[in-house]
Amino acid sequence: MHSWGPPSRPSTIKNWVIKPDDFPWFDRPNALELLAERQRRNNLADTDYQCLHEWVTNGYCIVSGAVSHELIDGMMLELDGLWTAEQPHKDLEIDGLRLGSETPPTKLSHRDVLALTPSVRAAARDRSNWRIHGFPACSRNAKAILNNPELLRLASLILDKPANPEYSINFMYGSTQSEHQDTAAFCVYPPNYIVAAWIACEDISPDSGPLMFYRGSHREPLFRGFPNYPQPNLKTASAEVTREYYEYMADLVRKYDRHLFVAKKGDVLFWHGMVMHGGSEIKNPKLTRRSFVIHYIPPGMDVADQVVGPFNW
């Protein structure tokens, strides 16, 4: 699994050529015919066929109870233990912390968090919409979920290629994140070879700011402000282009109905890299929305180390 630190990068911009046949099978005009051929060739189980059919037509599929409560509970205990740990975890950072009610969110190393007084630390934990990237590096249970055989199987089934769990995020509360597409936020070549899995780590309340997504939106083209993708994307875009991107998203979502993932603990929503999604409004700020997100990419298709800065993330 990759870290979110800056990798070693080239100094010159590459010309990325994308041909129609470079796109994944599910983005091709004859995707349903290709699926029918896979069904005949591989004798897919009914549940797998239905998942792939949903993926092609709607851009997502939902699997109930895919992750055991035991693993989730173990991960949550390890996550809660970060705030009272005696020793810091090397390279672990907690993002989105507010050290005062009027201060902007900031990112702190776990070492710096533990250096805070217990009362300041607890207040920051409880008032902040915080998140953690790469928690499996220091959590036995998070690592077990990251490498869950069924999740790996399903991601590989969707991509029709081996899928590596490259990135992860733990959320405690609803993200309230604006609508966006994961392809635009990652450096994947060829495009759309990415599967996201959103795992409910508790029963999700409709008042907690559930994940929102837009069925069928994966058929929209990539934002025109990202020519030569993956070089230009949300991580390399200027402030003006980023603003234009979110204006484009806000206009585009009007074409689609919004759906909320009001999931049960252990349920998983897999979605296409181009599906518009985000965090809905939090109606009750006292409610948590514990979740674990994994992004799967086939070997060699995460090309972040080949993209040139400057970077805004």
Image: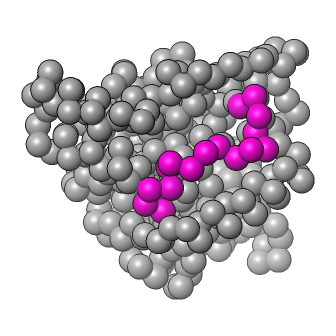
Q: In this rendering, does residue 63 appear at all?
A: yes
| Residue nearer the viewer, 175 or 286 | 175
Is 264 positioned to the left or the right of 307 in the image?
left
- Residue 243 rendering spot, x and y as whole percentages: 82, 58
Q: Count numbered badges in the picture.
A: 0
**Residue 288 versus residue 37 in the image, above or below:** below
| Residue nearer the viewer, 47 or 36 | 36
Identify the residue shown where x is 50% and y is 55%.
217
**Residue 254 versus residue 19 in the image, above or below:** below
Q: In this rendering, does residue 297 appear at all?
A: no
Residue 225 part of the magenta segment: yes
Q: How is the image coloured?
A: one colour
| Residue nearer the viewer, 145 or 214 | 214
| Residue nearer the viewer, 16 or 74 | 16
Is 39 positioned to the left or the right of 91 in the image?
left
- Residue 6 rendering spot, x and y as whole percentages: 75, 28
> Which of the 4 image quarters holds residue 247?
bottom right
> Which of the 4 image quarters holds residue 5?
top right
Dominant SS type (magenta) = loop
Is 288 positioned to the left or the right of 3 in the image?
left
